[in-house]
Amino acid sequence: MKKAKFQFAVLIGVCVLFALFLESNEQKQIQNNLEEIIACQGKLKLTLVREWGGLEPEDEAQLFHEPSDIEVDQNGLIYILDAGNKRIQVYDNSGKFIKTIGRKGKGPGEFTFPSDVAIDNQNNLVISESMNRIQILGSEGVYKNGFTLTETFAGSMEVNQEQELFFYNGGRSKINSLFLKYDYEGNNVGKIGEPEEEKERMLRSLKYMNHFSLDKQGNLCLGFSSRTILEKYSKNGELIWMDSYELPFKVPEVKIRRTSQGISTEAEIVTAGITVDDQERIYLATLTRKKSEEERKVGGEIAMMSSDGSYSQRTVPHTIESFNTDLYQLLVFDKSGKIVASQNLDVFCNKIKVHKDRLFVIDSYVAAKIYEYEISFE
């Protein structure tokens, strides 16, 4: 009798543990279907405040060439990374031009191919460049430190409250993880994301950069470039949840081909940016339809090395003449991954950033503009 009771208790215990496992697994798997997204249409309102730049701006200080990023510091100063002109333009919160930081060159405080800028809690500027070069400048633009990444590639970058730098890795280095963390001396201080199977690594290692952003808790939110998936990781590297969402068209599967030159990938790029606000809401810029052939050319780049070891780079030309489009939409998720709002965008989008109640939509290549919107919710 005692043996039977013991076996029954063990069975109950196993069932409870299995139920907890399923519950935990369900909490990590979130689905947002198209009906839910459509039902959230209009719950987000974007009111245009101003436009920065353009092909023929009235202010010469806003004559940008491929603006690629924007940041706002603790004093309200606005920093626009004018990547094509190898400089950072600084403005006050009224839009008045203050100064230029940087110029073309290879020395300290000079830029070659800058791609991203971040501002830490001391108002230092951290600039990422395509030759894996990282520079740390003071808010006045004075060079403080720099290093070259040797274990992964520079590109999109985030900085947390502990002044740790995050770079997307995606299994592209000997350290097989999604993200790598570095301190300001260039030391690798951690990684985010578990090792994966070979095919999955290749899917994550597309030549197009996946988009990611940190929330105020230090959690990392990742939007995959070619799949309708969001992931959220804790600052310790644990997967908090995986979120899938539907688009109004069927997203083609990523194709992987092995050639004599190596492995090539083909994919529909459906993510144009991700950012997180102070309420830990996640904003994701994605598509409403497939891109046309001309739209696919937007932002494409060719880089070549000359005989002296220097690089030249140019953007693939396109024939899009209108600054307006119906291609993009903005989806907003709460911190648990559930859709709470959606809104169509009518401009081209390469990246998005949020600061307090303002959303910045960056169009680097068509209009060379940054659109600043005031955000409000229903």
Image (cartoon, rainbow, N blue to C red):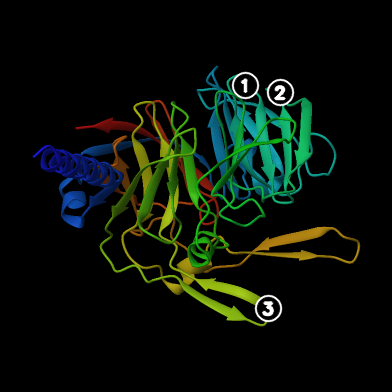
Q: Earlier in the sequence, mark 3 or mark 2?
A: 2
User: Tag 3: residue type?
Assistant: Gln
Question: Which of the image's four quarters has the C terminus?
Answer: top left
Q: How packed is label 3: few (under 14 Cα within 10 Å), some, or many (20 or more)?
A: few
Against 265, is 365 above or below?
A: above
Q: Give the SS element for disc 2.
A: loop
Q: Which residue is mark 3?
A: 261
Q: Is residue 76 visible?
A: yes
In contact (CB < 8 Å): disc 1 and disc 2: yes
Q: Residue at x 28, y 67 (%)?
A: 249
Q: Nearer the viewer, residue 61 or 72?
A: 72
Place of residue 318 in the rendered image (x, y in percent of width and height, measured from the top left): 54, 68
Q: Is residue 299 left or right of residue 348?
A: right
User: Tag 1: residue type?
Assistant: Asn
Q: Nearer the viewer, residue 317 or 213?
A: 213
Q: Which residue is mark 1?
A: 123
User: Tag 2: residue type?
Assistant: Gly
Place of residue 250 in the rendered image (x, y in percent of width and height, measured from the top left): 29, 69
Q: Earlier in the sequence, mark 1 or mark 2?
A: 1
Q: How packed is label 1: few (under 14 Cα within 10 Å), some, or many (20 or more)?
A: some
Q: Give the SS element for disc 3.
A: loop
Q: Residue at x 62, y 43 (%)?
A: 63
